[in-house]
Image: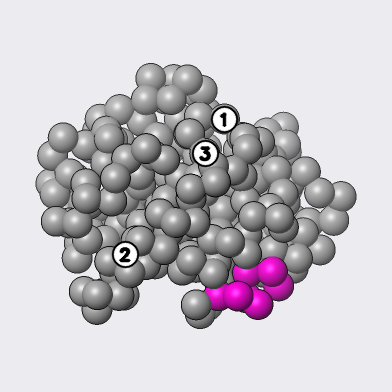
Amino acid sequence: MDIKIAPSLLSADFAHLADEVKKVEEAGADWIHVDVMDGHFVPSLTIGPLVVEALNHVAEKPMDVHLMVESPENLLDAFAGAGAHALTVHVEACPHLHRVLSSIRDLGCKVGVALNPATPLSMIENVLDMVDLVLIMTVNPGFGGQKFISFGPQKVESAHNMIAERGLGVDIEVDGGINRSTVASVAAAGASILVAGTAVFGAADYCEAIKGLRRAATRVAR
């Protein structure tokens, strides 16, 4: 399995975001994960499309935009126009999920659907063939640096089995509490895109941090 490491800008130095993007790309990042929070769907408020557009002029790696917002359908055009490679929306925020996922596809972005820790996989089984990735949250969204929720790997494995049974080429992304102690458990369960915030940006050596995560994941990946 091809393991992708996606450092989360939520844990980066916001005073030097462009430099942080360059540093993690040079250190081996595969994607740049952008956590967009609106202060409503989650308590925190982060960045909007203007910042993504500015960073897209600097970034050489794909911008993986994770919309933790209410009514994400109102922001799809703006983030796609800002240069998002992938747009991921939360099933909990989309009463018309089929329509929203179709809109992302029409915009030419990779299509992602995310689930909070307590949200069952049954919520996405009818749209699984519409997406490129399923994002399993292993913390409750809204803040960086949280403790990994222990039932995360079991949920990842269930998602992996559901995807395999249908013969789909859908990636599983995991976000929340990913570090060298937890990364192997989700990789062994079937995750291939690993979002890491504090584990990368909190490290003294970004290169060694990314290499360490990749080694630990690749060793056990399915």
Marker disc for residue 139: 3
Taking depth in this image into account, of 153 and 52 the one nearest to the observer is 153
Pointer 1 and pointer 2: residues touching (CB < 8 Å)?
no
Q: Is residue 219 magenta?
A: yes
At horizontal 36% and vertical 30% (from top left) the residue drawn is 69
Residue type at the position of mark 3: Val
Residue 200 image position (x, y, % from top left): 72, 51
Residue type at the position of mark 1: Phe
Q: What's the CA distance linking mark 3 and mark 2?
A: 22 Å
Q: Quadrant of residue 159?
A: bottom left
The magenta region covers 215-221
In the picture of the structure, the residue carrying the numbered disc 1 is: 143
Q: What's the CA distance linking mark 3 and mark 1?
A: 9 Å
At horizontal 35% and vertical 61% (from top left) the residue drawn is 158
Pointer 3 and pointer 2: residues touching (CB < 8 Å)?
no
Residue type at the position of mark 2: Asp
Q: Is residue 159 magenta?
A: no
